[in-house]
Amino acid sequence: MKTKSTFAVIFFTRKSRSNLNHLSIYVRITVKGKRAEMSLKRSIDQNEWDSTKTKGRGNTEKIRALNAYLDEVYNKLLKCHKALLEEDKIISSDAIKSRYLGEDDNSKTLKELITYHNENMIHVLKAGTMKNYYTTERYLQKFLQKKKRVKDIYLKQLNFRFITDFEHYLRTYKNTKKQLMLSNNGVMKHLERFKKMINLAIKLEWMHKNPFSQFQLKYNKYDRQYLTERELHLLEATDFTSERLQKIKDCFVFSCYTGLSYVDVKELTESNIVKGIDNNNWIYTKREKTDEQVKVPILPKAWAILEKYRAIQGKDFITNLLPISSNQKTNTYLKEIAKACGIQKNISFHVARHTFATTVMLSNGVPIETVSKLLGHTKLSTTQIYARVVESKISEDIQNLLMRFESKKQQSQEQANF
C-alpha cells in the first residue's frame, strides 16, 4: 500500500555499559511518528562523536571507515523503503527494519522454502513422491556447498545462471566409482521438482522474479517397454520349479491382464473383488499413486491366477490375494524369468501395465478412452504415452480399409451393370 508517510533515519548514541568513555551507536527509523531502533554493533569515544552531524568527528582512518559504514547503512535503509513502496507493501518502521535485517518474506532463503514445501506437502503428496523431493533437496545442498561454497542462499539471489549451473552440476555428477548418476530425463525431473518449489515461492510472494521463466525443460522421448503377444504367450506357457519365480511370474501375468501397478497388486484384497453390472467379477480399487477410482473387469486368465492362490491359501487366507515380494526383489526375479523364457528385454513389473495397455487392449481394438479408464488415468494424454498402437493393429486396420474400398468398388460396378 503506497502512502505519503513521513520517513526519517537518524543515528544516535547511548553510553556504553562496559566502558563509560565509549558510546554505542544506534540507528532510529521513524515512519509516521512511530520508531524502530537497532544497534549497529559499533562504538566510539565520546570526544569523537559529533551529535549535531550524527557522525564521527575527525579525519583519522578509523573515523573515515566508521562514517563510510554509517553512510552505507543509511543508503540501504533508503533502498528498503523504496523497495517496499514499489512492492505496494505497508510502510512502517518495523517493516523497514525487518527488510534491512533480512527477516521479512523478501529475505527468505532456499532452505526455508524447501522446509516449508516439505512440511506442507508431506500430507498431500505420496511417500514415493516425497522421497524424490528429498533426493532433489540433497542434490541442491551438495551443489550449494561444492559449487557455490555456501550452505544457503537468499531466494532473491536465484537467477537463470543459478538454474543452468545446477543443471550442469546434475549432468556431470558422479558417484564414488566415477560413474555418471543421472540421465537427461533424470536431470529434468530434479529441475521440474525444483521449479515447482520456486512456483510455490512465487505464490507465497517470497519471490518476485521466476528464474525458470526463460528455462525450458527438455525431456527425451523413449519407447516404453512392453511384451508382444508372442512374448506374453511364451511367458504364460513357462512354468518354474522355483516357487519364488513362479509366484512372481503369476503376479506379473495377472498385471498384464488387469493393468494394475505393483503397489495396487500388492494391496489387493478380497474386498476389492465385486460383481459388476454385467454380473461378472470386477476389481474395484483406488490407485495408490493418484487416489483415482479404478474399475477393471477380471479377464479369464487373471481370474484363473486368483483362483489358484485362493486354493493354495485355503483356510489360511487372511488379507492379500497374491504372494508378491518387495518391489526390488520382484524386479530382480523378473530379470531371471525373462532370461529363462528367452525374452531379450530388460523388464520390470511396470512393463506388465504397459503390456496390458498395448498388447492386451489397444492391439485388440479396445478404444483408447476405455483403456484410459481401466488404467485409472486422469488425462487421456497420459494413456497415449503409456500405450501405442502396434504394427499388427495398424496392418489389420489398413486391411479392413482396403476391404471396404474393394466392397464399394464392387457395389459401384454392380450398379453400373444395371
Image: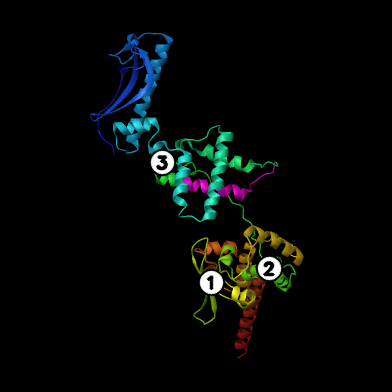
Q: Is residue 375 above or below residue 42?
A: below
Q: Which residue is mark 1?
A: 370
Q: Is residue 149 above or below residue 366?
A: above
Horizontal side of residue 46 vs 210, given as left or right: left
Sequence-first tag of 1 and 2: 2
| CB within 8 Å, label 3 to label 2 | no
Q: Which residue is mark 2?
A: 249
Residue at position x 54%, y 68% in the image: 372
Binning the other alpha carbons within 10 Å of mark 1 as few (below 14), some (14 to 19) or many (20 upward) gives: few
Q: What's the residue type where badge 1 is placed?
A: Thr
What's the distance in space between the residues labelled 1 and 3, CA to CA?
44 Å
Determine the residue located farthest toward the left in the rendered image: 33
Q: Is residue 331 above or below residue 120?
A: below
Q: Which residue is mark 3?
A: 206
Q: What's the residue type where badge 2 is placed?
A: Lys
Which SS class for mark 3? loop
